[in-house]
């Protein structure tokens, strides 16, 4: 009798419409397996996934029926050969590489195909919360993780022998990849990833998201639904316009647009009369609210950046968040709605700040309001997981000291959202001379790691310094 060969089941949850790029790629992958790995017996199964958890359960059952030793989950939008070459390529050898590690559960590196385009690898952030790994946590080798993405996941079948079926449930709280890795960890199994292996993630537009282009995709993408538990919708802006209309007395966005342009001609007169910057921002309270509502709702690039910020933050567990120079405070307000510990900081007595106070009170939300006289903030002993500083540093003559102060109050590994690497408008009357290059140099000096053009992570491997 012939010796039994190791059996590997390749399962693909499938919606039904698979892109030609995936079909060609997987066809070449199967040819590679047949030619290069004769020591294994391969089985394959495609299951429709109108409900993904059902498809994954059916795939596991099929692998068990074939008495397989391994299950390789491959989603219907993954690309193995990201270079899209026509000849032989080492990329198709990823399965041998995963098997060689001899791990119970092991995945590879790929990125979300929209929203934050984060690596689909997770670490525990609390007892029931998870966050995506940061770029500086990717080793590009074999590494332990708490969750590996289900788009490319190799699992020894003995893992399922220890778990209680059904293995996957509706995704009310966790995705199917989190469900599996969480259950396995509770049974003592370890989850690993070989991040030297990268697969591409195919967007509906047929673009392949990889490490090389994902930062560009982040700001261009208009599909925030790719982020699990995404919440950005038109209602955020509709509610804002409705509330601003009530507070200002302007009928609608069209009337706000008219008044949004009404006060800038007074800047030169104000400065000539010896007025301070802080006093200037206290003038024209209704018109300033109108201007910020108009800008935040009609400028496509501004909406993109706001939606990226709201999607990039992990909402599975409450975080300490500072919205510095918050103005009407779209991030602050929305994060408070999500249950985060939010501090909103701006110049005392400005119309935009008072509007945000009013909105928060109207909805009964919890938020701390920190008044500033203008200039370098005084943050005391507070430390934050996230600081939002959008469209504000360029309004401060001492922007460099302000950046130092903000970073000093950002926790190691924390996130700073700031758009001064892409904002270059020195001729704006209210702006001081803060050019993108100067900001990027300053960010590097503050040990911030740029994830993209508006997201910076504070290095977590530096010694903590006492701060008065």
Image (cartoon, rainbow, N blue to C red):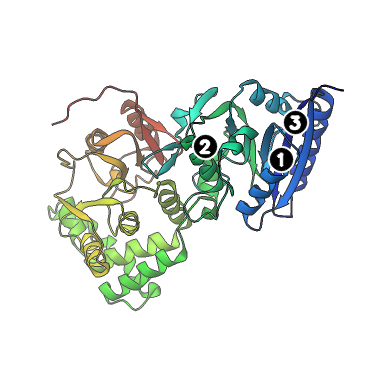
Residue topped by disc 2: 184
Q: Is residue 319 above or below residue 444?
A: below
Which residue is found at the position 72% from the left and 25% from the top? 93
Q: Nearer the viewer, residue 191 or 87?
A: 191
Label 1 residue SS: helix
> What residue did someone put label 3 on?
7
Question: Farthest right residue?
Answer: 1
Distance in Å between CA atoms under marks 3 and 1: 9 Å
Q: Quadrant of residue 162?
A: top right
Dot 2, how many residues are within 10 Å of its Cα: few (below 14), some (14-19), or many (20+)? some
Answer whether residue 210 is visible to the viewer in this image: no
Image x and y of residue 36, in percent: 81, 23
Picture coordinates of residue 349 (x, y %)? 15, 60
Label 1 neighbour load within 10 Å: few <14, some 14-19, many 20+: many
Q: Which mark is residue 422?
A: none
Earlier-in-chain disc, 3 versus 1: 3
Q: Which residue is mark 1?
A: 63
Q: Residue furthest bottom?
A: 251
Q: Position of residue 246 (x, y in %)?
A: 29, 75
Work out whether mark 1 precedes mark 2 in sequence or the reverse, and give the earlier one: 1
Query: What residue is at 15 percent from the left and 56 percent from the top?
Result: 348
206 left or right of 391? right
Q: Element at badge 2?
A: helix
Looking at the image, residue 391 lies above or below residue 215: below
CA–CA distance in space, label 3 to label 2:
21 Å
């Amino acid at each position: 009798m012939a010796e039994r060969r190791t059996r590997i089941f390749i399962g693909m949850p499938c919606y039904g419409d698979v892109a030609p790029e995936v079909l060609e790629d997987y066809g070449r992958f199967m040819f590679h397996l047949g030619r290069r790995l004769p020591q294994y017996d391969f089985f394959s199964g495609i299951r429709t996934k109108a409900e993904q958890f059902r498809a994954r359960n059916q795939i596991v059952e099929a692998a068990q029926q074939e008495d397989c030793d391994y299950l390789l989950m491959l989603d219907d939008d993954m690309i193995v050969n990201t270079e899209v070459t026509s000849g032989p390529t080492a990329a198709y050898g990823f399965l041998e590489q995963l098997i060689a590690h001899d791990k119970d559960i092991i995945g590879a590196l790929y990125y979300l195909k929209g929203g934050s385009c984060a690596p689909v690898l997770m670490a525990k952030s609390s007892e029931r919360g998870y966050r995506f790994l940061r770029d500086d946590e990717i080793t590009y080798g074999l590494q332990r993780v708490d969750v590996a993405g289900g788009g490319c996941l190799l699992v020894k079948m003995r893992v399922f022998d220890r778990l209680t079926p059904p293995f996957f449930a509706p995704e009310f709280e966790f995705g199917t990849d989190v469900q599996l890795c969480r259950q396995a960890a509770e049974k003592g199994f370890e989850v690993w990833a070989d991040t030297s292996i990268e697969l591409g993630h195919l967007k509906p537009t047929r673009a392949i998201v990889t490490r090389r282009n994902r930062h560009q995709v982040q700001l261009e993408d208009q599909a925030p639904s790719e982020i699990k538990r995404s919440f950005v919708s038109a209602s955020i802006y509709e509610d804002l316009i409705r509330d601003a209309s009530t507070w200002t007395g302007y009928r609608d966005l069209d009337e706000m647009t008219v008044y949004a342009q009404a006060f800038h001609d007074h800047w030169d007169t104000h400065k000539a009369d010896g007025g301070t910057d802080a006093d200037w921002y206290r003038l024209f309270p209704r018109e300033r609210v109108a201007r910020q509502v108009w800008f935040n709702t009609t400028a496509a690039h501004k909406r993109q950046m706001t939606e990226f910020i709201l999607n990039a933050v992990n909402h599975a567990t409450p975080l300490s968040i500072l919205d510095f120079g918050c103005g009407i405070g779209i991030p602050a307000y929305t994060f408070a709605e999500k249950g985060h510990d939010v501090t909103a900081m701006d110049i005392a007595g400005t119309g935009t700040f008072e509007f945000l106070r009013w909105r928060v009170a109207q909805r009964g939300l919890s938020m701390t309001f920190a008044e500033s006289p203008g200039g370098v903030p005084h943050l005391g002993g507070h430390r934050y997981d996230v600081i939002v500083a959008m469209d504000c540093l360029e309004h401060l003559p001492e922007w460099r000291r302000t950046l130092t102060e903000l970073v000093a109050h950002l926790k190691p590994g924390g996130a700073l959202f700031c758009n001064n690497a892409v904002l270059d408008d020195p001729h704006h009357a209210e702006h001081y001379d803060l050019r993108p290059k100067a900001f990027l140099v300053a960010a590097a000096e503050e040990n911030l790691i740029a994830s993209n053009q508006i997201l910076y992570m504070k290095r977590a491997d530096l010694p903590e310094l006492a701060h008065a």
